[in-house]
Image (cartoon, rainbow, N blue to C red):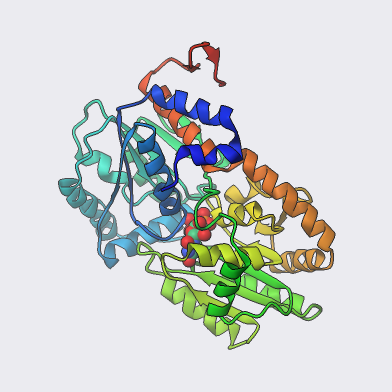
Amino acid sequence: MISLEDYQSIIGKRNIKQIKSLARLYRGKKIIMVNSTKDGGGVAEMLHRLVPLLNELGINCRWEVINGNNGFFNITKNIHNALQGKRIKFSNEDLEKFIRVNKENAKSINLDADMVIIHDPQPLPLVDFYPKNKTKWVWRCHIDMSRPDLSLWKFLRKYLMEYNASIFSIAKFSKILPHPQYLIAPSIDPLSGKNRELSSKEIEGVLKTFNIVRDKPIILQVSRFDSFKDPIGVIKAFRIVRKEINCRLILAGGLASDDPEGEMVLEEVKKEARGDPDIHILLLESKSDIKINALQRVADVVLQKSLKEGFGLTVTEAMWKEKPVIGGEVGGITIQLHNHRTGFLVNSIEGAAYRIRYLLNRPSVSYKIGNQAKKFVSQNFLITRHLRDYLALFYILGNPGKDIIYIGKSKKNFGS
Ligand code: UDP
């Protein structure tokens, strides 16, 4: 079991002390996180790490997952897609079902707490089915809300009016809402199986499992099979590059239980790959942390060619491993990759192909960018920073009007 003290070697004693002092201000309070899947995707990834750490810090934090059948998750996936800008028409029955399933969940999930944090739109309407008491309700939006479908947004906004605050990953996603909005960037856990150092034996073991030979440069994208991650665009970019440079492509990803579209996208990807022996399509099971870690470590270039992206933890994970990352210029990827400094942003298949070639032909540039990328992640996107942001938020929401937090004995300003 990883404990907060274990992060000291990465972030230093002073930062650990700050986190503990902040946590003291909210110790003994009860927080409940709610989302729609235990496995698959970035939200589950983060909750698996944040919830135990909050408990270790003396905050009583529980994680609940709403239930629903395939019909429900088809609707919520469409809601997710429409909020990310896809044109989708919702029937009244769909929207009624979306609300009804939330109402049924409310009967079995006890959300009596000081604060309830609802992740993403799937459980958003739950707020309507609980008594209005002391509980603070916070909506934590992880998706790319730069251009949501407006009629759907209007519908969901009714429920959001009942919340006390919202959290977005980047400023561009914020909306006009009648409550305070906070910006909290997601994070990775440097000590998890997905991000810790691996021995060469562990890495070779993974490559053997997947029959991957390291005889030529490896280009990698790790993602759920989702059209917003543009796996077809990745294959097309790879084909352009391969005309000049002999290389391999690995597309690795799994299916999330709240994403019924995954299998269809996977089939499209297989069709596009046309049995090409240099294109490895790896369907990962839910507990594939070491495998993903190893694949990211052997890659020469990592892609995240998303067309929409709330944040893109896969980008952060690869940057942490000092890889040069090329990402779509969308959503949260734009606060991680800064051209020629921490990675590259692209807007087309040709652009992606150009940057892959550029990096494969310049190992010293790849090395320098990878180096800077790791530093940038360690300063901005580690779980300890995330924990500190949450703790500050708990305090601020629990103490309206107090926007300066004094911690420890010195009463020094902790920061604004
Ligand atoms: N991931 C995983 N298995 C997979 C695909 C992705 O464990 O088959 C992980 C990935 O390593 C990352 C997270 O799930 O930690 C995906 O987060 P991201 O923000 O990149 O995308 P999301 O899936 O949330 O849209």
Which of the pair 182/276 is nearer the observer?
276
Residue positioned most to the top: 410
In the drawing, does residue 379 fall left or right of residue 413? right
Q: Is residue 381 visible?
A: yes
Residue ID at (45%, 33%): 390
Which of the pair 332/254 is nearer the observer?
254
Q: Quadrant of residue 276?
A: bottom right
| Quadrant of the frame with the C terminus | top right
Which of the pair 25/91 is nearer the observer?
25
Residue 321, x across and y down, in percent: 65, 55
Report the number of numbered marks: 0
Residue 99, x across and y down, in percent: 25, 51
Residue 140, x across and y down, in percent: 42, 41
Residue ID at (57%, 72%): 251
Q: Quadrant of residue 293?
A: bottom right
Residue ID at (48%, 76%): 266
In the drawing, does residue 249 fall left or right of residue 177? right
Q: Is residue 264 above or below residue 135?
A: below
Q: Is residue 398 above or below residue 316?
A: above
Q: Is residue 86 visible?
A: no
In the drawing, does residue 316 fall left or right of residue 261? right
